[in-house]
Image (cartoon, rainbow, N blue to C red):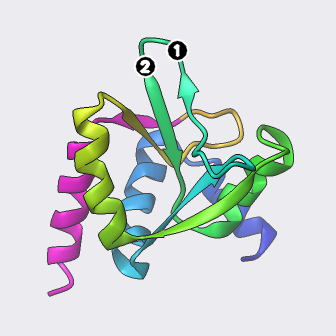
Amino acid sequence: MHIKQLETVFKLESKERYGYLIRKVADFGQVFLIADKKGNYVTCGTDDEMIIPIWPELEFAQELIKTEWRNCVVKMVELTEFMKWMDKLESENYLVGGFPNQKLNSIVVKPIEIKNHLIFECQQYE
């Protein structure tokens, strides 16, 4: 991905980035997360709100491990596995941060919400 495209998309408002996330994940069938060296996915938020951030493309997540999560790695998750995982996260009261930028600003949704948004978007391709 060209650096200008990366910068342009990161500058979008949170709502616009979330829409970009949904379209790209539905289109390519994968999502990117950041994990620590033990393989645990990173979270942000407070003790009351555990938010798992996700990105639509590898390059966006890689930008965050340059600054925010230096000792971590980017992991790709296939869409089918991600959708199953959303049910588990919902039952454990996690939230999902849809496409945070470098300041970690993002739309925060319940796992069932992002799952439903992705199901709807995937149906547009049928």
Q: Which amino acid type is marked by label 2?
A: Glu
Residue at the far bottom: name it: 126
Residue 108 x/y as whole percent: 39, 33
- 65 w.r.t. 5: above or below: above
Q: Is residue 53 rendered magenta in the image?
A: no
* Relative horizontal placement of residue 12, taking residue 28 as reference (left or right): right
Residue 53 x/y as whole percent: 52, 43
Residue at the location (61% across, 63% down)?
75
Residue sitting nearer the eye, 123 or 69: 69
Residue at the location (44% across, 61% down)?
20
Q: CA distance from mark 2 to mark 1?
A: 5 Å
Residue sitting nearer the eye, 15 or 31: 31
- 49 w.r.t. 70: above or below: above
Residue 84 x/y as whole percent: 26, 59
Residue 26 disc label: none
Q: What residue is pinned by disc 1?
A: 46
Q: What residue is pinned by disc 2?
A: 49
Q: Which amino acid type is marked by label 1?
A: Thr
* Relative horizontal placement of residue 14, taking residue 120 as reference (left or right): right
Residue at the location (58% across, 68% down)?
57
Under tag 1, what secondary structure? loop
Examine the residues drawn in magenta and state their main secondary structure: helix
Q: Are marks 2 and 1 in contact (CB under 8 Å)?
A: yes
Residue at the location (20% across, 45% down)?
112
- Report the magenta residues as a range: 106-126
Q: How many marks?
A: 2
